[in-house]
Amino acid sequence: MLYWFLKWIALGPVLRLIFRPQASGVDNVPDEGPAILASNHLSYADWLFMPLTLSRRVTFVAKAEYFTTPGVKGWFQKKFFSGAGQVPIDRGGASAAEGALKSAKGILAKGELFGIYPEGTRSHDGKLYRGKTGVARLALETGAPVIPVAVVGTDVVAPPGKKFGSFTRPIVRFGKPLDFSRYEGMENDRYILRSITDEIMYEVMRLSDQEYVDVYAGVAKDLSKKSDDEAKRAERAEREAAAEDKKAS
């Protein structure tokens, strides 16, 4: 009930009025039945704008900590995230990835829409990175179609590392459903999982017009941070050397 209140009465109308998000390909999302919405991930605002363009509920998985923080703040946080269409990762599995998969399968088993970001984390530079194969495993184990999604402009509204950016009209593009039933029973074949994931990411790339990088986003982010740190150290060393030269002269 809180989900629909936020979407149609409280938060949704405000976002529509201010940002006027645009959508295309909405007809590619089925009116009923399970489907996996596999999207690029540019900003924390993605999970607000993408569901806003659909009449159906879209559910994502989120860190369990969002639902278990104690105190008044934790209570409000839990209510907001659950009301905004997020469910905690089921920690019954051996890892967070297994827990996310278990939670997702439960959502799809109820005939609902499940949203997932195959990159696993937000892009730090606007490029599209290699997808993780959990989305492929989920598609094969549930038989649900995968709908590629591109969200454009949210990194302007809410850039990485910032709560707010500048104004733009976010665009959400839904691609045609992808059916992987031809691979039924092959969910343990890592080559098949990689092939399916790459096919999904190719469609996301076509919809988003992003530059694709065949590296995991987390790895690229770490390398970028390391490079930035090295550049800062080099710059500091140059300043110190210049200061020493000035003293010597």
Image: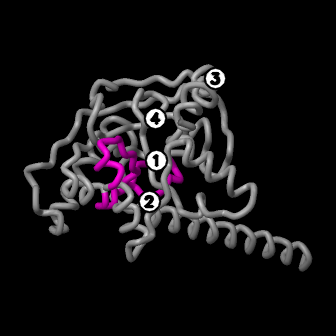
Q: Which residue is mark 4?
A: 51
Label 1 and label 2: CA atoms lie apart by: 10 Å
Q: Secondary structure at mark 3?
A: helix
Q: Residue 106 at x, y = what percent?
A: 34, 54
The type of residue carrying mark 2 is Ala
Q: Residue 66 at x, y = what percent?
A: 60, 58
Q: Residue 51 at x, y = what percent?
A: 46, 35
Q: Which mark is residue 18?
A: 3
* Side (left or right) of 235 relative to 208: right
- Residue 37 shown in magenta: no
Splitting the image into 4 quarters, where does residue 135 fall? bottom left
Q: Which residue is mark 1?
A: 41
| Sequence-first disc among 1 and 2 | 1
Span highlighted in magenta in the image: 106-134
Q: Foreground residue, 89 or 179?
A: 89
Q: Which residue is mark 2?
A: 217
The type of residue carrying mark 3 is Ile
- Residue 117 shown in magenta: yes
